Image (cartoon, rainbow, N blue to C red):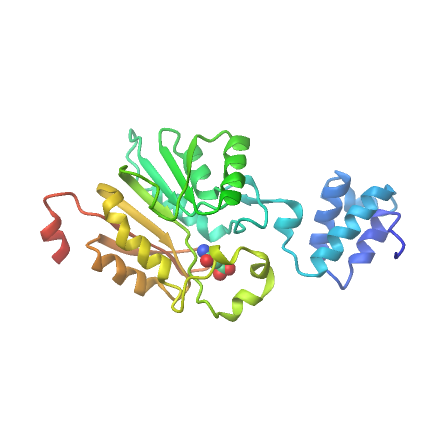
Amino acid sequence: MAELPATLGEALAAARGRIPAGEARMFLREVTGCTAAQVAAYPERGLAAEQAARYVELLDRRAAGEPVAYLLGEREFYGRRFGVSPAVLIPRPETELIVDLVKARIAPEAAPAILDLGTGSGALAVTLALEIPAAWVTAVDLSPTALAVARGNAAALGAQVSFVESDWFAAVGAARFDFIVSNPPYIVDDDPHLAEGDVRFEPRTALASGRSGLDDLTRIAAAAPAFLAPGGWLLMEHGYDQAAAVRVLLQAEGFVAVASARDLAGIERVTLGRYPLRGVDAGARQA
Ligand code: GLN
């Protein structure tokens, strides 16, 4: 076995050319409990053997491509730390857009019923429950291991969420929701992106969705009206080139006020629509 680094400075040197320096500093913080400033200011500070061994393991696994979020077991979403494991998609900043769009559509006194389809780590469901304390949030996932991660996050962050193991709406029951949100899989099955970077290590079922990438978006759009309260909203994240197709899907299902919202990179990332209030259906469909 190669010699273990004996100091913070040696540890950073061992990472050079293998992983970005910022990631090496993060791993050092993780194994030593030092702050970033301490790591930078005290290169001669000694490392205990078990700290060094743990650091070298993180370094080697990261150099082999494993995502930082899985190595550290956490990722920030909407300002909160979420536990993550390879059973769940790593939360991404663009998905925070869905939280903002829901918050912008809530009346001050409202206690909306919200459903999160394919909750994964629970990032959306838990964040919505905490941001909208009066909300009733239900979150489903097909994967029991993902649900265990999501339940852990709800408990750790003090969020009230009802979790259900379900293939999309299959086990949701007779409830109707004011908001249905989802970050479903939407990548084309043979997209080369699936073989690159972090995505290689993430659950394929959370990423890929048929030959057009639209299989799950289509399924959810078709089923959602039966689970929406009159005037309820459906909001779905999708790929950078899918906004127009998803708008057409929603319009074809009778949604109104259909629009797409851009993420911080300027990409149309979330498409939303409102299921009409009963009685105005016919007129609204022509609008
Ligand atoms: N946006 C992610 C990516 O392209 C995919 C997330 C998803 O499929 N829901 O890496």
Q: In the figure, is residue 57 to the left or right of 240?
A: right
Q: Name which residue lies at 43% across and 40% down.
A: 125
Q: In the figure, is residue 264 to the left or right of 24?
A: left
Residue 63 in sight from this viewpoint: yes
- Foreground residue, 70 or 104? 70
Q: In the figure, is residue 227 to the left or right of 214?
A: left
**For residue 239, above or below residue 43:** below
Residue 149 location in percent, x, y?
A: 54, 40
Q: Which corner quadrant holds the N terminus?
A: bottom right
Residue 116 location in percent, x, y?
A: 39, 43
- Foreground residue, 170 or 27? 170
Residue 76 location in percent, x, y?
A: 56, 44
Q: Name which residue lies at 49% across and 43% down.
A: 144
Q: Name which residue lies at 51% across and 58% down.
A: 204
Quadrant of the image occupied by residue 266:
bottom left
Residue 264 in sight from this viewpoint: no
Residue 211 location in percent, x, y?
A: 40, 69
